[in-house]
């Protein structure tokens, strides 16, 4: 642990973070870096400019901020990015946050990764207390993978997944449903995940960041359509599994695994949203699809103590927007100008 003692006494107070619509905030997603070793077509432009190093929080600063959130009642932290595992020394963040699992102040520490580095880190992640990982994989075809990620070799992902399995980590695959790119593979992916013992979540492409040209409309595939197509060949059984997130789940009877749908466009589930996002520069975004934010870095670097940080966090959450306004249409600009890697997906 570094930084101040901010209510890390092992007790389990209820969340002190309730927004103006009565939603309790118990889930923090933290972007460890905006950088990535891939350039997925829906996430980044081919030629990205990344943040100057001085703007990015040190891992100690991130841990201090996360501790302030935990002190206020956050129970789950997901480390994301950019690609969290390309940040040098990132395992120290997992180890520091893992201490809060031991005290019982935190219920779950997890990450979202492209898995290209997971073979190096799976055992250490497990050692730090991580038990589940989300791995983004949009296709099983090496050539398509190289095209979608612009830089990637799928073998690295398979190595990472094998390492995750042998380390004892549960895996959920995140697959962005892309019209004409991978829509013919979704059923095969479901079968493959069943054989591997992985859950699968399908994601609708979200209009974040300018990709140049009409890319987003070309990519958009409504999951309502995907679900009805899948239901012709698979027995998809409704289950009550509300994580307070944007995903809705069914059980795939043939494999026993869960299948999730993240549908910000055909449906939105903002009413029971329980999460906020912290960028690698210390900006707290109250909603993925809105620009409202609070910059915590200056306060942190000015030596703000735990109480001041917690007050700033509580104030920001008090004005969390009701929901996002994502829409995809012929004339629609991105709902927010920043790319997904900046906010943390
Ligand atoms: N690099 C890691 C990865 O790919 O898993 C973590 C960060 S990535 C931004 C997190 C998730 O956001 C990934 O599952 C990715 O597919 C998804 N994502 C990125 N851009 C998106 C977009 N415009 N619409 C929907 N999902 C997106
Ligand atoms: Fe990198 Fe993840 Fe974005 Fe792909 S989705 S470019 S792996 S941050």
Image (spheres, grey):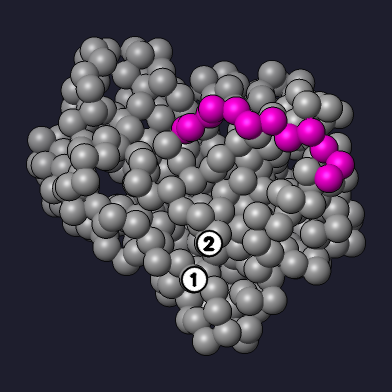
**Magenta-drawn stretch, dominant element (helix, strand or loop):** loop
Q: Is 241 one of the magenta-colored residues?
A: yes
The residue depicted at 22 percent of the width and 57 percent of the height is: 294
| Quarter of the view holding residue 273 | top left
- What residue is shown at x 35% (from left), y 64% (from top)? 290
Q: How many marks?
A: 2
Q: In which quadrant of the rendered view does residue 160 lie? A: top right
Asked if the residue under mark 1 is in contact with the one under mark 2, i.e. CB atoms within 8 Å, the reply is yes
Q: Which residue is mark 2?
A: 265
Q: Is residue 301 visible?
A: no
- Compared with 188, 293 (above or below) is below
Task: Kindly identify which residue carries mark 1.
Answer: 327
Residue 220 drawn at (x, y percent): 65, 68
Q: Residues within 10 Å of mark 2 (few under 14, many from 20)?
A: some
Secondary-structure class at tag 1: loop
Where is residue 282 shown, x and y percent of the image? Answer: 31, 53
Q: For mark 2, give the secondary structure.
A: loop
Who is closer to the viewer here, 86 or 261?
261
Kindly identify the residue that appears in the image at 27 percent across and 35 percent down: 24
Residue 337, horizontal then vertical, whole percent: 43, 74
The answer to whether 286 is drawn above or below residue 130 in the figure is below
Residue nearest the observer in this picture, 63 or 277: 277
In the rendering, at what x and y percent does residue 77 appear? 42, 34
Is residue 295 shown left or right of residue 244?
A: left
| CA distance separating discs 2 and 1 | 6 Å
Start-end of magenta stretch: 232-243
Does the beta carbon at disc 1 come under 8 Å from ligand 1?
no
Q: Residue at x 54, y 43 (%)?
A: 247
Within the magenta stretch, is there residue 57?
A: no
Could you say which is closer to the camera, residue 281 or residue 327?
327
- The numbered dot on residue 77 is none
């Amino acid at each position: 642990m570094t930084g101040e003692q901010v209510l890390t006494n092992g007790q389990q107070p209820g969340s002190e973070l309730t927004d103006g619509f009565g939603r309790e905030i118990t889930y923090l997603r933290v972007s460890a870096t905006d950088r990535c070793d891939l350039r997925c077509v829906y996430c980044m432009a081919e030629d990205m400019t990344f943040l100057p190093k001085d703007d990015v929080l040190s891992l100690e600063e991130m841990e201090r901020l996360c501790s302030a959130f935990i002190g206020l009642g956050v129970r789950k932290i997901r480390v994301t990015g950019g690609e969290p595992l390309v940040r040098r020394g990132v395992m120290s963040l997992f180890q520091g946050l893992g201490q809060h699992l031991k005290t019982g102040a935190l219920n779950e520490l997890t990450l979202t990764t492209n898995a290209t580095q997971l073979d190096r880190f799976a055992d250490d992640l497990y050692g730090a207390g991580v038990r589940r990982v989300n791995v983004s994989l949009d296709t099983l075809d090496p050539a398509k993978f190289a095209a979608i990620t612009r830089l990637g070799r799928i073998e690295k992902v398979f190595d990472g997944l094998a390492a995750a399995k042998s380390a004892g980590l549960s895996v959920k695959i995140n697959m962005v449903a892309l019209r004409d790119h991978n829509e013919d593979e979704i059923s095969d992916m479901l079968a493959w995940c069943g054989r591997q013992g992985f859950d699968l979540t399908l994601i609708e492409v979200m209009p974040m960041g300018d990709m140049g040209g009409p890319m987003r409309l070309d990519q958009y595939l409504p999951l309502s359509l995907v679900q009805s197509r899948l239901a012709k060949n698979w027995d998809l059984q409704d289950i009550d599994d509300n994580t307070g997130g944007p995903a809705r789940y069914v059980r795939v009877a043939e494999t026993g695994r869960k299948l999730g749908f993240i549908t910000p466009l055909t449906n939105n589930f903002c009413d029971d949203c329980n999460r906020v996002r912290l960028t690698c520069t210390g900006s707290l975004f109250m909603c993925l699809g809105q620009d409202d934010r609070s910059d915590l870095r200056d306060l942190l670097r000015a030596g703000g103590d735990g109480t001041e940080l917690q007050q700033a966090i509580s104030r920001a959450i008090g004005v969390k927007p009701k929901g996002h306004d994502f829409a995809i249409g012929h004339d629609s600009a991105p709902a927010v100008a920043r790319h997904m890697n900046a906010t943390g997906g």
